[in-house]
Image: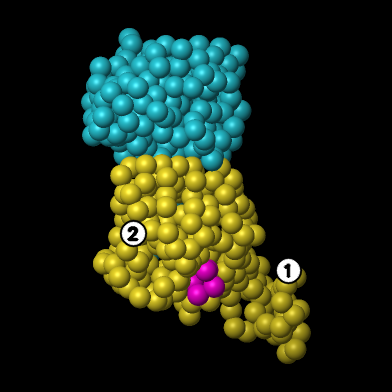
Chain colours: A yellow, B cyan
Amino acid sequence: MLYFKRLAPIALAGFLTACGGSSSTNGDPNANPMPVPTPDPVPTPAMEYQYQVTVTNLTNFQPLSPLALVLHETGQIWQIGQSASTMLENLAESGDNSGVMGADFVVSSASNDGILLPGMSAEVMIMTTDMMASHLSLATMLVNTNDAFTGLNAIDLSMMEVGGMMMFNPSVYDSGTEGNSEMAGTIPGPADGGEGLNAARDDVDFVAMHPGVVSADDGLSSSVLTGEHKFDNPAVSVKIVRMQ
Amino acid sequence: MKNKQLLAASILSVFAATGAQAQDLNISITNLTQGLHFTPLIVAAHNGDASMFSVATTASTELQMMAEGGDISGLDTMLMAASADIKTNPAGGLLAPAGSTETMLSTTDGNMYLSITAMMLPTNDGFVGLDSWAIPSEAGTYTIWLNAYDAGTEANDEMIVGGAGGAPGTAGIPAAPGGNGGANGTGVSDSQFNTNVHVHRGAIGDDDATAGSSDLDNRVHRWLNPVAKVTVTVQ
């Protein structure tokens, strides 16, 4: 009987691996054919989903805040026309990704090492053993703005095969939580070194496409930004490759 | 769910089946801008090792020649050395705002990627570009929207200085073909943060044709992406 019980999960694990992966609730930890990085006594033959995400900053002078890269089943970091969550407001105004990374709908999260400068790329690995966490989202602030961000909104990876690749060229969004005054003291990036999060919502209070920055060179006399900080879409390119 | 899976599978197979074999392409290119001219275009099918440009890398000298002065001879020579199939100057000169041009391109085995570039005038080193679009093997008509890029090789001073401005490494814009450029600008920007190829941030311009900081007209010499539409018919 014991012998039989041990055999069944092995066979099941083999089957599931062959057809693209799943998790099950029965069995014996020894039945897992692959090493599991966590020491927890997980009683499932877990399949690992691993993605390599390469983000390239295509702007001239908009460094990007530390990436918030997340896998999830439900939920979204933002929705056009809806009021930004506090965690999105924090990311878009100050570049703090901790709220988004820790959101209740997030199953797995990953980031890069610090700021992603213009003309540079960052490669981040993200993984999960939860087959339902098949949607990938990304958010990062354009730091020489009041509250601009770019990213990916719940991209469905469930049909992606190992070795498969997807490319995206996301546009820039405005979180709608802070007016685009471009004034000294309101922008956290190196153009200003000003304030990050301001909990007051003195803008339209819904997420929309960003209208672009004006800058002092283009006639907004009170702006701390120059023509160098202007941008057009797309702001980044994102390549997703499924590794496992 | 089942339908979704089927759809995804068929999309994958289309992408997987890019053309390794020789193909005949009909390529139509439209300048979507209202006030920018394209210098002579270069259109090429090439292998996976060649490219005209790559974002987030330093521009080649050949790309710089094209982006600063509209000179495609360097790219042409480079692509010929890579055994690419090339069409130069399909529009027979400048492609005016809202103008279209059409060309045929027969590709040889292994030249599976399509690239297109041309300088945008008047800009310092702005160009319209398509980088290594995988040519589908399946017959059909495909539409691609192109962005404006900045070669990152020259500061965007927006000064129209005549032909000399087209030489690689020489500041300034060689010409404003629309005849609507200004003069005597003092220069907009004497530096450029991102010196790799990147998405062009747009022009600043001003409203003074005989002075001010820029020789560009801030009502005319501006654009938003996309700046060109390319229609490829695979026969």
Q: Residues within 10 Å of mark 2 (few under 14, many from 20)?
A: many
- Please tell me which residue is depicted at 30% across the width and 52% down the height of the picture: A211
Q: Total marks drawn?
A: 2
SS for callout 2:
loop
Q: Which numbered tag is attached to residue A16?
A: none
- The answer to which quarter of the image holds residue B193 is top right
Q: Position of residue A142 (x, y in %)?
A: 46, 55
Q: Residue at x 39, y 13 (%)?
A: B162
Nearest-to-viewer mark from 1 and 2:
2
The quadrant of the rendering that contains the C terminus of chain B is top left
Main secondary structure of the magenta stretch: helix
Q: Which residue is mark 1?
A: A34
User: Vertical placement of B228 versus A48: above or below?
Assistant: above
Dot 2 corresponds to which residue? A180
Q: Please determine whether, in this image, residue B161 is positioned above or below residue B2.
A: above
**Region in magenta:** A96-100
Chain letter of disc 2?
A
What residue appears at the point 37 percent right and 42 percent down from the top-left corner?
A: A217
| Residue A19 in sight here | no
Q: Residue at x 44, y 39 (%)?
A: B199
Relative to A171, A3 lies left or right? right
**Vertical position of residue A168 compared to residue A108: above or below:** above
Magenta segment includes B181: no
